[in-house]
Amino acid sequence: MVTLGEEVVMGGHATINAHLTEKGELVLSPVRVGDGALLGTGSIVQPGCEIGGGAVVASRAVVPKWTKIPPREVWAGIPAKCIRLADGTKPGD
C-alpha cells in the first residue's frame, strides 16, 4: 500500500496513511513517494497521494487524500499547497 523510492527522508513522527475512515466507510488507496523526496517532521500524507521525486512536504503539513505533488515542489500548510519550487522560485515565476 505504500511505495517509497530511493533515498526518501522521513522526519520524526511523519505519517503516511494508506487508509482512513470517512463517513463510516473505509477508504484504502496506495501512496507513492518518489526518489529523494522529503517528508518533514510531523507531516501527514493521506491515502491515494503521489509525492514526486525530490519534492518536499514541510513539517506538520497535511497532504489531503488523492493529492498529486509534482517533482521538486515544496508543499506546506493544512491543507498542504505548493509554496515554491525546489530551486527557490515561486510557482508561475
Image (tube, rainbow, N blue to C red):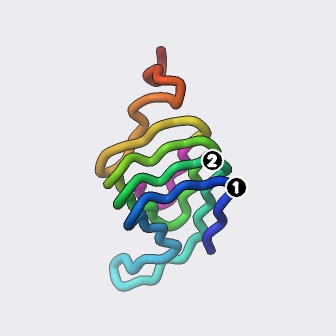
Residue drawn at (65%, 53%), measured in percent from left and top? Answer: 7
Classify mark 1: residues with Cα within 10 Å, few (<14), some (14-19) or many (20+): few
Total residue callouts:
2
Query: Considering only vertical position in the picture, is 15 above or below 90?
Result: below
Q: What element carries label 2?
A: loop
Query: What residue did someone put label 1 on?
Result: 6
The residue labelled by disc 2 is: 36
Measured as percent of width and height from the top left, residue 42 is found at 35, 60
- Horizontal and vertical percent position of residue 68: 55, 49
Q: Which amino acid type is shown beneath numbered disc 2?
A: Gly
Magenta stretch bounds: 63-69
Look at the image and tell me in which quarter the N terminus lies. bottom right
Residue 17 forms part of the magenta stretch: no
Q: Which of marks 2 and 1 is nearer the N terminus?
A: 1
Give the CA distance from mark 2 to mark 1: 6 Å
Residue pictured at 70% horizontal, 55% vertical: 6
